Amino acid sequence: MSQEVIAEIAAELAEADRTHSVIPRITARYPDAVIEDSYAIQGVWRDSQIAAGRRLVGRKIGLTSKAMQQATGITEPDYGVMFDDTVYESGAEVPVDHFSNVRIEVELAFVLKHPLEGPDCTLEDALAAIDYAVPALEVLNSHIELEGRTIVDTISDNAAYGAMILGTERRRPDEIDLRWVPGVLSRNGEIEETGVAAGVLGHPATGVAWLANKFHQHGARLEAGEIILAGSFTRPMWVSRGDEVLCDYGPMGTIACRFV
């Protein structure tokens, strides 16, 4: 893709984000687009948001579990950025009109105490760099038509990230076996999805190491203090205005929110 086309699509996505609307599939219009193009689009959009005053607080990793890969038909992880105005606390009222194609995923988030960089970052390196884990729900926000989309479309759209709701229970990696943290996701009192964190690449922190290695390819690293949203271990659950959402993470507490 030319820089001009990349900038045009990034502007389309920024407008779709502003108006909470959906644009035609990028890969339908540009069938030769590749993953490098999609990260370039995401980067132009990200830089425009930072220039407008938004503050980057972390990264999301997506499509790290078989459940999510099967739900989307996409077979490799991706990543996007998270800004400070997208972070909610448990108990929040989340405005559904701020998002498009609104769904919820069950995840763990990690806060780094040390920078982390590739090219040979391992799970052990990631665990050593993590200050604590905290349960999180991710709100998916897709500005590109869902039918037929590929990973190129998803990455361009900031990996479909909309917001996250953070729990209050924090655990150091040496305090709990993070692989066996459960997630029981309910909507309006009815259980819809269940899973355990091991569904994310065998260990939820494996994605953090993957991301550090991916960043190294672009001459970058993960920084201390960043929040890394590690990927869902359940399928996405659709939500609508008025829905009450509760997720039980067993020893790591619960998260509740309401869509208004």
Image (cartoon, rainbow, N blue to C red):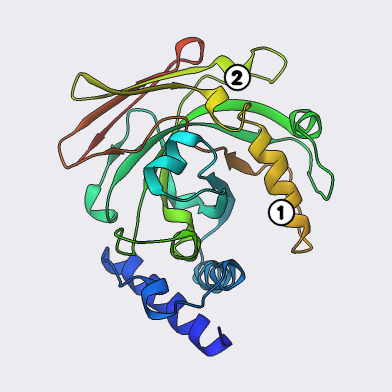
Whether residue 165 is visible to the viewer of this picture, yes or no, is no
Quadrant of the rendering where the N terminus is positioned: bottom right
Q: Is residue 13 above or below residue 155?
A: below
Q: Which amino acid, mark 1?
A: Lys
Label 2 neighbour load within 10 Å: few <14, some 14-19, many 20+: some
Quadrant of the rendering where the C terminus is positioned: top left
Q: Which amino acid, mark 2?
A: Arg
Residue 53 in percent (x, y) is at 51, 66
Residue 248 in percent (x, y) is at 39, 17
Between 21 and 5, the residue placed more toward the observer is 5
Whether residue 31 is visible to the viewer of this picture, yes or no, is yes
Q: Is residue 175 above or below residue 208?
A: above
Residue 187 in percent (x, y) is at 23, 27
Mark positioned earlier in the residue sequence (1 or 2): 2
Label 1 neighbour load within 10 Å: few <14, some 14-19, many 20+: some
Given contact means CB atoms under 8 Å apart, are the residues at marks 1 and 2 in contact? no
Real-space CA distance between mark 1 and mark 2, rounded to the nearest whole angstrom: 23 Å
- Give the residue drawn at x 50%, y 68%: 49
- Give the residue drawn at x 44%, y 65%: 153
Query: SS at mark 1?
Result: helix
Determine which residue is flagged by label 1: 214
In the shown orientation, is residue 195 left or right of residue 20?
right
Determine which residue is flagged by label 2: 179
In the shown orientation, is residue 90 left or right of residue 172?
left
Between 194 and 71, the residue placed more toward the observer is 71
Residue 195 in percent (x, y) is at 43, 22
- Give the residue drawn at x 48%, y 59%: 151
Query: SS at mark 2?
Result: helix
